[in-house]
Image (cartoon, grey):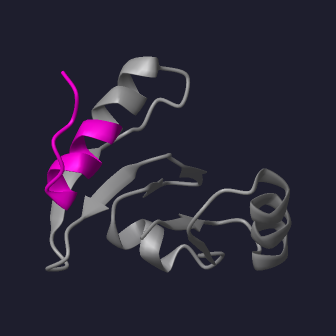
Amino acid sequence: MLLGVSVDPDTTLAAWARESSYPGMYASDSGQVIGKLYGSIRGSSEVRNVFIIGPDGKITHRMTPFNVMSQDAYTELEKAVDQTAGVSSPP
C-alpha cells in the first residue's frame, strides 16, 4: 500500500490524486506533526523524503531527501519496495 503524506490541504491532495490517477492513499499533514516526527520539516521548509515501511511497521529504507528529478532515485525506490515486499528486482 502507498501512503503519501503532504503538508498540502486535503482538498488539494484529493484533486491532485484524482487528476493524476496515482494508486494509494494520501493524507494531509497541514499541522506538520508527521513531518516533524520523520525529520521532513526543517525550519519553515518541507523536504521531500521517502520512507519504505515494512509489514511489521518498521522503516526498511530511507531516501532523505528524495530527488524527484533523478532517474537513479526511482530505480533505488523500486528496488527498495521490491526488497521490502520480498520480490526480486531486475538487475
Q: Position of residue 9 (x, y in %)?
A: 77, 73
The image shows residue 57, relative to residue 74, as above or below, that is: below
Magenta range: 78-91
Identify the residue at horizontal 75%, vertical 67% (top origin).
13
Q: In this view, does 12 lie to the left or right of 67?
A: right
Q: In which quarter of the image is residue 79?
A: top left
Residue 55 on image: x %, y %: 19, 76
- Residue placed at 15% from the left, 41% from the top? 88
On screen, residue 46 above or below 67: below
Residue 43 is situated, as x and y percent measured from the top left of the image, at 50, 54
The quarter of the image holding the N terminus is bottom left
Residue at the spot 59% in from the left edge and 54% down from the top edge: 44
Q: Is residue 32 left or right of residue 56?
A: right
Would residue 78 appear left or right of 87 to someone viewing this image? right
At horizontal 29% and vertical 32% (from top left) the residue drawn is 76
Judge by depth and name the residue closer to the eye, 53 or 7: 53
Q: Is residue 71 above or below residue 75?
A: above
Residue 22 among those drawn in magenta: no
Provide residue 81's location: percent of width, then percent of height: 28, 50
Figure check: 27 above or below 2: below
Q: Which of 87 and 2 is in front in this view?
A: 87
Q: Which of 7 and 52 is in front in this view?
A: 52
Q: Which quarter of the image is occupied by the C terminus?
A: top left
The number of discs equals 0
